[in-house]
Image (spheres, grey):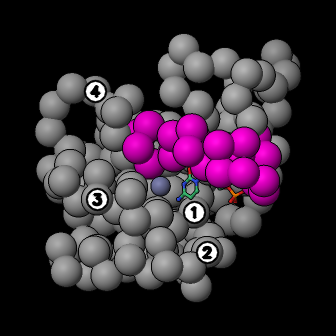
Amino acid sequence: MTAQDSGKRSDYLSWDDYFMSVALLSAQRSKDPNTQVGACIVNRQKRIVGVGYNGFPTGCSDEALPWHREGDFLDTKYPYVCHAELNAVLNSVPGNLAGCSIYTALFPCNECAKVIIQAGIREVVYLSDKYAATDSFRASRRLFDQAGVVCRQLKPASRIVTITLDENG
Ligand SMILES: Nc1ccn([C@H]2C[C@H](O)[C@@H](COP(=O)(O)O)O2)c(=O)n1
Ligand SMILES: [Zn+2]
């Protein structure tokens, strides 16, 4: 019997698109007004073992710290925000991340690159590389290259994934 004869749906999400969609859905939780990033860690058995998004550390109010991009360093978000990839690693189910892949909406910065490498993650799948020209992201590339972590930009099969939160489906 062919796939067509079986009646199976043909427009289901690929694994790559599915895991990136989970990362992007997680990003919707971010309070950052400028850039919302989500990350999803997947093990070799294609099981999701951690998700995260960019936000302030637990216990630090989303209203008491600044979300600004400019101004004195201490008056911007940068010294306070935890990146999506860091949170995905820290939120992961206790165990081993060795050999896992991380799906992230935005290519990891150098600080997250160090965490990803040290956690044993071997593949980075990203959607956007909008900060590729900055030193932080150039450093990440260098770290990943040396550590043998494979990076690939996802070219999604489906550009739009629709989720309707409606009790009638
Ligand atoms: N791979 C990345 C890159 C950035 N982030 C977070 C950190 C900030 O909340 C935001 C970047 O802010 P922007 O300079 O674009 O206003 O994105 C991350 O979680 N993961
Ligand atoms: Zn980072």
Q: Indicate the position of residue 15 as horizontal and vertical percent values.
A: 45, 56
Q: From the image, tell me which residue sits under label 1.
A: 106
Q: Which span of residues is magenta-colored?
A: 67-88
> Residue sitting at 28 percent across and 27 percent down?
93
Q: Are marks 2 and 1 in contact (CB under 8 Å)?
A: yes
> Residue sitting at 84 percent across and 22 percent down?
166
User: Residues under labels 1 and 4: Cα distance?
Assistant: 23 Å
> Residue sitting at 82 percent across and 16 percent down?
167
Foreground mark, 1 or 4, reads 1
User: Residues under labels 2 and 1: Cα distance?
Assistant: 9 Å
- Mark 2 nearby-residue class (10 Å; few <14, some 14–19, many ≥20): some
- Magenta stretch, overall SS: loop
Q: Earlier in the sequence, mark 2 or mark 4?
A: 4
**Front residue of 160 and 28:** 28
Q: Earlier in the sequence, mark 4 or mark 3?
A: 4
Assign a secondary structure to mark 3.
Answer: helix
> Residue sitting at 18 percent across and 73 percent down?
147
Q: From the image, tell me which residue sits under label 2.
A: 131
Q: Amino acid at mark 2?
A: Tyr
Q: From the image, tell me which residue sits under label 3.
A: 114
Q: Amino acid at mark 1?
A: Leu
